[in-house]
Image: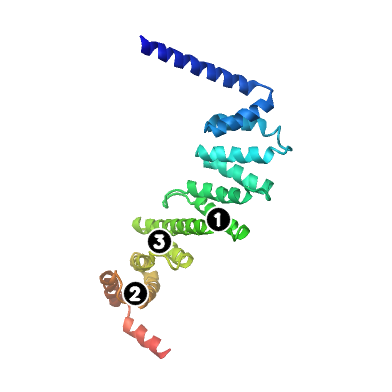
Amino acid sequence: MKIRIILAVIIALFAASCGEYEKLLKSSDYQLKKDKAIEYYEARKFVKATELFAQILPRYRASDEAEQLNWLNARAYYELRDYIMAGTYFTTFSGTYPFSRYAEEALFMAAYCDYKMSPKPELDQDNTRKAIEGMLLFKRRYPASNRIAEADMIIREMEENLVEKSYLSARLYYDMKQYRAAVVALNNSLNEYPDTKYREEMMYLKLNSQFLYAQFSFREKQMERYLEAYDDYLTYTEEYPEGTFQKEVKKIYDALSRVIKITDIGTENDKN
């Protein structure tokens, strides 16, 4: 019986609270709405706070309180993990109040929201690129900030995502046995990220893709493509004379030596 009474009281209080909040949303007392929005923010009731901020911000746009209210609104969306809205409001704040005491943090947080939305490397990396651009802008604008080290760490992490994305995309063509596309993708990735940790593997995949592409080509095109594979072989062995893929590369060399006169090529190169 006591439990039922307690539950009834709780439900009644909750209903009354909801009723008061609904009245507040419909109220034309913007001073009260402003005070309540701040109160909800401080109580970490961020959903209610943002709903009220949305109503009052246009009214306070030209006031002395606008800066603080816009900052709290951006922070509230961040606390809700709504990084799209938070990033938008942090960016707007940074542009609207460039001399605010919050301006530095706003610019950092705008980029940080993109960082929080950066997905796994195999997915689209638009937010990753935006995070890098945002952090680079932050570093240019606030070179003496105590958050430079954090910005650098985020940039490195995001760049690694782009490197891995490039590798995975190129590798996908190889796995799908689309060897011509694989050669192009691997070559582009190596040119764009020459210091990638995947460099040796990608050079081997490019060599093997070029060899297999030649092998499955029309006869009149084979020799030209085998010679391109041989060039890739020379590039790989020069850079990785004791590489991880030595056995695989040796098999490709043996196959190439059966279809082109490699000794003649070497002699001709020596003359040059």
Mark 2 — residue?
Answer: 240
Q: Of label 1 and label 3, which has the lower sequence position?
A: 1
Name the secondary structure under disc 3: helix
Q: Which mark is residue 249?
A: none
Q: Is residue 260 left or right of residue 185?
A: left
Mark 3 — residue?
Answer: 182
Gap between marks 2 and 3 measured at Cα? 21 Å
State the residue in front, 34 or 227.
34
Gap between marks 1 and 3 measured at Cα? 32 Å
Say whether marks 1 and 2 touch (CB < 8 Å). no
Relative to 104, say whether 228 is above or below: below
| Kind of residue indicated by mark 2 | Tyr
Residue at figure coordinates x 36%, y 59% from the top left: 174
Q: Which mark is residue 135?
A: 1
| Kind of residue indicated by mark 3 | Ala
Residue 86 screen position, x and y as percent: 56, 41
Relative to 240, say whether 143 is above or below: above
Q: Of label 1 and label 2, which has the lower sequence position?
A: 1
Which residue is situated farthest in the bottom direction here? 271
Residue at figure coordinates x 60%, y 57% from the top left: 137
**Quadrant location, the C terminus:** bottom left
Residue 31 screen position, x and y as percent: 68, 27
